Amino acid sequence: MTTRETLLLTPPAAPGSGRDRSLGRRLEILSRMPWLAKAAPGDVRAVEPFVRSRRYRPGELVYSVGIPADHLFCVVSGAVRLVRTSAHGRDVVTDILGPGDSFGGPGLLGHLLYPDSAQAMARTQVLTIPADRLVEMMDRRPGLARAALEEALHRVEQTRQTIRRLSADNPQQRVAAVLMLLADKFGTEQDGALVLAPSLTRVEMAASTGLSAETVSRVMSLLRDDGIIGTGRHWTSVLDRGRLAGIAEG
């Protein structure tokens, strides 16, 4: 066990003790994860003993493409991006994940190896569940199997949305779609605007849209001049969400 990895479950103590309250808090966190939100309380308790919490620094890899897909991951705090390499050798960001999102998903989508790399975009905490334990519990608990299936279908839809975003002919539409994704997942209201944290660099935006960094800079400048977004050295804010959504939808 590494210094950044801690077992979430400790042996239960007497009711009302600090350790007992800590267990209750961990169960609460798990039950709020979308893929477990509809599961029975007993199913959540069955998962909890095998869950570990890990923390990552900005830029640190959670896993690399091509290694055995032996864990399911769920974001507790922070942000994670999924990156694939195109046929032309270019890194493409296929998704940006925030609190409550899961990824990895061994076996849920038929992957024996991770098809992408996962990288922390900020200080990030994730929960991990071993694949073999997850499969065992799904075999015994239909509620968990249904929740896992729903999560797999959700991720398929997310992939379809990514393909739609990257296939748009209009560069402004691509950039707006990524900004909307960030606003919906990470936007914080401040003085009438939605401040995006994390805020992507131009290079990161380019990887997320399939555009060049120069094109991204030009589009961002146009959106800023139109009063739709605000930008600074290390920040981006959405000033007019309605107009940005309209551009993203094309």
Image (cartoon, rainbow, N blue to C red):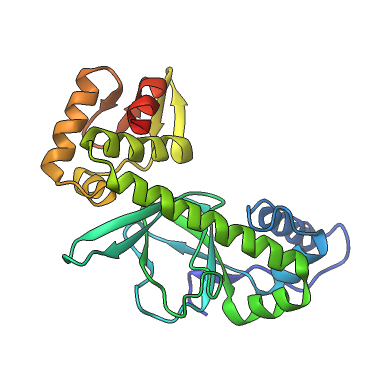
Along the horizontal axis of the image, is 95 left or right of 107?
left
**Residue 14 image point, x, y percent:** 88, 66
Along the horizontal axis of the image, is 187 left or right of 6?
left
Outermost residue, right side: 15
Q: Residue at 21% across / 34% down in the picture?
A: 233
Judge by depth and name the residue closer to the eye, 100 or 172: 172
**Residue 104 image point, x, y percent:** 48, 68
Give the quarter of the image for residue 36. Answer: bottom right
**Residue 139 image point, x, y percent:** 73, 78
Give the quarter of the image for residue 237. Answer: top left
So how many labels did they put on this image? Answer: 0
Is 135 above or below relative to 208?
A: below
Tell me if I can see residue 123 in this picture.
no
Q: Residue at 25% across / 28% down in the picture?
A: 231
Q: Residue at 29% across / 49% down in the picture?
A: 208
Along the horizontal axis of the image, is 101 left or right of 40?
left
Tell me if I can see residue 92 in this picture.
yes
Judge by depth and name the residue closer to the eye, 22 or 129: 129
Q: Residue at 78% across / 56% down in the picture?
A: 21
Is 56 above or below relative to 236?
A: below
Give the quarter of the image for residue 150. Answer: bottom right
Instruction: State the quadrant of the C terminus.
Output: top left
**Residue 216 image point, x, y percent:** 18, 39
Judge by depth and name the residue closer to the eye, 250 or 198: 250
